[in-house]
Amino acid sequence: MGDVVSAWGPAGVFTMRSPTDRPLVFVARGTGFAPIKAIVEQQLSLTPERRIELFWGVTSSSDLYDLDTLAEWLRTDANLRCWLVARRFEEGFISPEGAVRTTGRVSDAVVGSKLDLGL
C-alpha cells in the first residue's frame, strides 16, 4: 500500500508491446474501453494462456456496452477476470456471469482487488 504506479494512456499509437509471458492489467473508463477491447480480443486469440485483469469503470451501468462480447470472453477464457465498476448500477442491471460488480471509482476497484502487480 502506498506504492506509486506510473501509467501512460494512448497518444496516437496504441499497440501491445508486453512480453507474452507477463500478465496484463487493463484499466478503462467509459468509451476508453474501445481500444482496450481490441487488444483484449487480440490477446485472447494469440495468447489464451495469458492472465488478463480488466477493470472497466463508468458513471452508470447504462454506459456499459457490448456486454454480450464480454460475457462470451468470460465463458470461454479462464485466464480473464473482469471488474465492472459504476458509480451507480441501474435497477435491473445484470452483470455478465463471472464479472465482479463494484460500486465506486475504477481506481478504487484496482486498489481493492489486491492484485499482485509485481512492483
Image: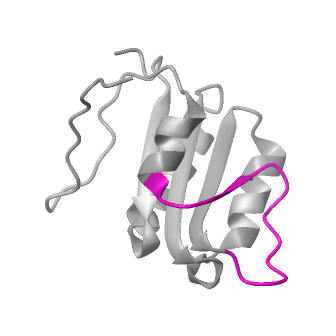
Query: Which quadrant: the N terminus?
Result: top left
Judge by depth and name the residue closer to the eye, 6 or 16: 6
The relative height of residue 104 versus residue 60 in the rendered view (above or below) is above
The picture places residue 95, in percent across and down from the top left corner, at 78, 65
x 39%, y 62%: residue: 35
Q: Which residues are magenta?
A: 89-106
**In the shown orientation, is residue 95 left or right of residue 107?**
right
x 34%, y 41%: residue: 16
Magenta-drawn stretch, dominant element (helix, strand or loop): loop
Query: Which quadrant: the C terminus?
Result: top left
The picture places residue 59, in percent across and down from the top left corner, at 50, 76
Judge by depth and name the residue closer to the eye, 1 or 8: 1
The relative height of residue 27 versus residue 19 in the rendered view (above or below) is below
Quarter assignment of residue 92:
bottom right
**In the shown orientation, is residue 74 left or right of residue 119?**
right
Judge by depth and name the residue closer to the eye, 84 or 36: 84
The relative height of residue 28 versus residue 108 in the rendered view (above or below) is below
x 41%, y 15%: residue: 118
Q: Residue furthest left?
A: 11
Per the image, is 42 magenta? no
Judge by depth and name the residue closer to the eye, 38 or 108: 108
Q: Residue furthest front?
A: 2
The picture places residue 7, in percent across and down from the top left corner, at 23, 41
The picture places residue 37, in percent across and down from the top left corner, at 50, 59
The relative height of residue 111 versus residue 56 in the rendered view (above or below) is above
Number of numbered discs present? 0
**In the shown orientation, is residue 76 left or right of residue 19?**
right
